[in-house]
Structures are given as C-alpha cells and as structure tokens.
Amino acid sequence: MPLKKITAIIQESMLSDAIDALQKKNIPGVTVSHVKGYGEYINTFSRDSLQPRVKLDIIAKEKDVHAIAEIIMNAVGTNSEGDGIIAIAAMDGLYRIRDKQFIQ
C-alpha cells in the first residue's frame, strides 16, 4: 500500500485540539515542529512578518490520507484567514530504524 506524507501548518493555539482529535481517531503517529512563516496574508506592517505556527507531519497509508486531513480541518478550522494549510506528498517508502525494515 503506497504511503503519503501529510504536512499541516496550523495556528499554535490549535495544537492541543489537533492532537486530541488525531488521538481519538487512533492515528498512530505525528511529529510536531514549531515553525515561523507567512502565507497569503502577510503582515507588511510588522517588523517581523513571520508568524509562529506549528507543523504536523504524519505518514499514512494512501487510503487514510483524506480522512486524516478531514480530522485536522474539523479540529482546527475556524473559517478565518490564517487557519493554515494541509499538503499531501507521495513517498517512495521509509525505513524503521529499530528493525531496519523498509516499508512502502
């Protein structure tokens, strides 16, 4: 089964909501990074136009990708500018370091 990488960039204040929703649906793993950036609505009046955000990375089976994206959108969406984005990328596979197993 092909793997996909889901990357969600969300507001920092919504991190707990996203993690709670993913855990309730038994999503097996997520990596969280604190990042800064700007998107479509850059604040040109600020000295530092980069806004703090949180990046969630999830590796999932292709069949589960859209359901996981829905979980995140439902948990963190406020229907406002700056809610964030979700990107889906193909993966050739990954190695599990523990047992050196290659997973596709």
Image (tube, grey):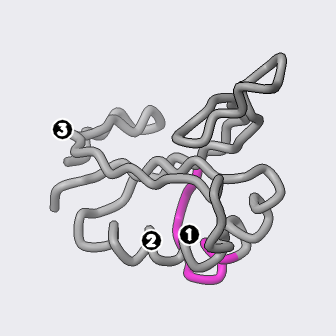
Q: Are marks 3 and 2 in contact (CB under 8 Å)?
A: no
Give the x, y percent position of residue 81.
63, 58
Q: Which residues are magenta?
A: 21-30
Q: Which residue is mark 1?
A: 72
Q: Position of residue 50 (x, y in %)?
A: 71, 26
Looking at the image, is 72 positioned above or below residue 87?
Answer: below
Magenta portion: prevailing SS class? loop
Pick the front one: 51 or 9: 51
For the image, the number of numbered tags is 3
Residue 76 coordinates in the image, percent (x, y):
66, 69
Query: Neighbour class for label 1 at 10 Å: few (<14), some, many (≥20)?
Result: many
Q: Are marks 2 and 1 in contact (CB under 8 Å)?
A: yes
Q: What type is the residue that disc 1 sits on?
A: Ile
Query: Which numbered tag is attached to residue 68?
Result: 2
Q: Nearer the viewer, mark 3 or mark 2?
A: 2
Q: Residues within 10 Å of mark 2 (few under 14, many from 20)?
A: some
Residue occupying image coordinates x 71% and y 26%: 44
- Please name the residue shown 80% across and 64% down the image: 16
